Image (cartoon, helix red, strand yellow):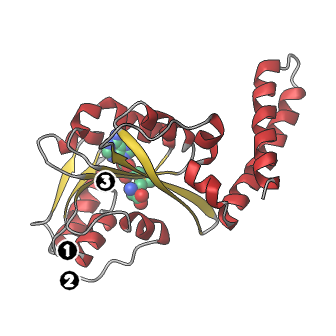
Amino acid sequence: MTNEIVLSDRLRNIMAFLPNGSYFADIGSDHAYLPIAVCQNDQEAKAIAGELNEGPYQSALKHVKQQLLSDRIEVIKGDGLEVIQNKPVKQVVIAGMGGGLIRSILEKRKHLLKDVERLILQPNVDSECIREWLLDTEYQLIAERILEEDGHIYEILVADMLTTNRVREYSAKELLFGPYLLKDKNRVFKQKWQRELTNNHNIIRQMKQAKKPDLNKIKQFEIKGKWIQEVLEDD
Ligand SMILES: C[S@@+](CC[C@H](N)C(=O)[O-])C[C@H]1O[C@@H](n2cnc3c(N)ncnc32)[C@H](O)[C@@H]1O
């Protein structure tokens, strides 16, 4: 029996960055809700749902079959980008994982991205390391979103393949906060960094209580705390 998938706010925001008629891969697709919703909303769209683990892979297969979308969504079991080998996908989505894992998935088989025009990345933590990674690639950040859902704060980073030279590099502060998010500084952004500031204070306090405090590390956290304070105050 088919029925329309109702996406979370987070996945709906990700979906909004896919063009009409997209051919995309959702790496770490789990239940395959994103490819299913995209194909239900756009008759021209096609997708690959990639999954490393057996349980989520079976779940994706089952949902795609139930929704009668097996002709447009290929569910493939595999590690990261290997599922796009010889598949001319134009967009890649990697969502709901840590920034470090997303970065390592991209880095491991970056040669397979040569025809991919857009990356839509949603790290649960550590988006800074993805922004840093993008600087060493053929991709340019073109948009960022921050949103809150069920008490969690999520960031979405969108990067397009460069068609000309890179417009500009980013400062260390822009890499940490996000160049687009920093321009906007909306309510959720402030909430996120207020939380981070509190965590930062606690970490510094604990580090100072150690028998042999690591002064270099403490300095790094103090600089980060100063930046957060500046960004929150400068409004
Ligand atoms: C927390 S879920 C996120 C699911 C979905 N992308 C979302 O945002 O709702 C992460 C999924 O990534 C899968 N995964 C982890 N590492 C992977 C890898 N190297 N390649 C493919 N899938 C992976 C896990 O099995 C899991 O189903």
Disc 3: residue Cβ within 8 A of ligand 1's nearest atom: yes
User: What's the amino acid at mark 1?
Assistant: Gln
Which label number is shown at residue 66?
1
Q: Compared with residue 67, is residue 62 higher up or lower down, i.e. above or below? A: above
Mark 2 = which residue? 1
Most extreme residue toward the top is 212
Q: CA distance from mark 3 to mark 2?
A: 21 Å
Mark 3 = which residue? 55
Q: On the rendered image, what quadrant is the N terminus found in?
A: bottom left
Q: Position of residue 158 (x, y in %)?
A: 42, 53
Q: Residue at x 22, y 71 (%)?
A: 39
Q: Residue at x 54, y 44 (%)?
A: 127
Q: Position of residue 35 (x, y in %)?
A: 27, 65
Q: CA distance from mark 2 to mark 1?
A: 6 Å
Q: CA distance from mark 3 to mark 1?
A: 17 Å
SS class, disc 1: helix
Asked whether disc 2 touches disc 1, contact meaning CB atoms under 8 Å apart, the reply is: yes
For marks 3 and 1, give the one nearer the viewer.
Answer: 1
Which of the two discs, 3 and 2, labels the residue nearer the N terminus? Answer: 2
Q: Position of residue 31 (x, y in %)?
A: 33, 62
- Disc 1 crowd rating (10 Å Cα; few below 14, some 14-19, many 20+) is few
Which label number is shown at residue 152?
none
Q: Residue at x 29, y 82 (%)?
A: 4
Q: Residue at x 83, y 19 (%)?
A: 215
Disc 2: residue Cβ within 8 A of ligand 1's nearest atom: no
Q: On the rendered image, what quadrant is the C terminus found in?
A: bottom right
Query: Can residue 157 be seen in this snapshot?
Result: no
SS class, disc 3: helix
Residue 129 appears left or right of 21: right
SS class, disc 2: loop
User: What's the amino acid at mark 2?
Assistant: Met
Residue 164 lies in what quarter of the image? Answer: top left
